[in-house]
Amino acid sequence: MVISMSRVIIIGCGGVSKVAIHKCCQLDDVFTDLCIASRTVSKCDDVKKELEGKTKTNITTKQIDANDFDALVKLFNEFKPEIVMNLGMPYQNLIIMDACLEYGCHYLDTACYEPEDVNEPVWRARYEKRVKEKNFTAYFDYSYQWEYRKKFEEKGLIALLGCGFDPGVTQAYVAYAKKHEFDRIDTLDILDCNGGDHGYPFATNFNPEINLREVSSDGAYYENGKWIKVPAMSIKREYNFDGVGMKDMYLLHHEEIESIALNYPEIKRIRFYMTFGESYLRHMNCLENVGLLSTKAIDYKGTKIVPIQFLKELLPDPSTLGPRTHGKTNIGCIFTGVKNGKEKKYYIYNMCDHQESYHEVGSQAVSYTTGVPAMCGALMILKGYWNTPGAKTVEEFNPDPFIEALDKYGLPKTESYDPIMVD
Ligand code: NDP
């Protein structure tokens, strides 16, 4: 079914949301009514003002605490959205999914659920069990959101999980490679390069809390049905990225490995690498050593402070990095496998320029490469291209219309059949 007009709520109004809002407003014949709802409503009002006179989309704004289930359901009942795009924090994924089920609308996010307090006893007990059984130590894991599969199926609704670039587009690349390039995929390396320079000694390109939690955790990759755990930043490679040049990259655990391993069990090895500069790593190590990356609340003169949240307040807001960031990102997937009985290699990636993103939507490329896929994912659901109900990750859907939309709306793919391999 093709929807000619649609009502959409975006939760959160940070770097990623701002891009998604701009992109939705560029498609104002589809995204006719948009409600921006976030904790600090003045940020929503500022974006609305920026877009005044530039779009036919009707924009409303609303203050919301996404931890408040009743307030979410009330807002959904008032606004009557077809889809809620959760572009705030992953801590609230489950509560927003519950509210979508209660009201009866589709759901989308860009990051896998993880708890705000990793010392909460019930969550911790399940976590410790998983670590023991699977050697899987990341704080995020899809099992919590996959438990919603049946509930969304029964209501005929879609919960589209992790629809940014990575996770998100990287999984569409896997589905695309399998559909068009391979009979069997053997190995996959996901490479995420940010060749951008913002001029600060230390700043993160997306939410500092989520970014620093991810980067300071153990690394892991998936091989022959097992998680192989390695100390954080202990596997380093150099790679010559198209549009960027030579960069150091480090093996990280990343959320899409879990869902790709489940949905494509034929892939024998899945690894994820991200580039980091020396200054970033030096600062991160130092902050970790002094305890500023801790998620455990401490008492400071009678006030409870979570060190990593305090640090976030001190660091530059990623949504303000746009004007000062120069260079490109390059994110993609390198595959080996077999087609028509012959072994082959294939690399599919996107390059995105920080300044071009800034001039188009006022944000740097890390927000752009996340906000554009979020808009395209919502578009797939609203246009009915993706219509199988359930709580699903991107690789579970037909990649073709999504990749076509990415090509059209700002994140075109580049392909290579003779890539340099990562050893
Ligand atoms: P920001 O910190 O810039 O923005 C987060 C927004 O959520 C802020 O506006 C914040 O409000 C709002 N928010 C936080 N808590 C609540 C709450 N309880 N109720 C309502 N609103 C709330 O983050 P980013 O835009 O950089 O990142 C957004 C998401 O995208 C994150 O989950 C991140 O992990 C994910 N991401 C995914 C990527 C991918 O490729 N898949 C890549 C990059 C990011 P306030 O303004 O008051 O602080």
Image: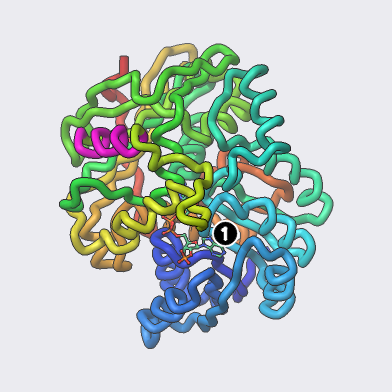
Q: Which residues are magenta?
A: 278-288
Q: Residue 351 or 258: which is nearer the viewer?
A: 258
The image's colouring method is rainbow
Q: Quadrant of residue 394?
A: top right
Give the farthest residue toward the right. Answer: 154
Left or right: residue 372 compared with residue 356: right
Residue 5 position, x and y percent, is 60, 76
Q: Is residue 400 magenta?
A: no
Which residue corresponds to mark 1? 86
Amino acid type at mark 1? Asn
- Eyeballing the image, is 140 above or below 97? above
Give the total of numbered labels. Answer: 1
- Eyeballing the image, is 402 above or below 287? below
Q: Is residue 283 magenta?
A: yes
User: Is residue 51 visible in this depiction of the protein?
Assistant: yes
Give the farthest residue toward the bottom. Answer: 53
User: Is residue 406 visible in this depiction of the protein?
Assistant: no
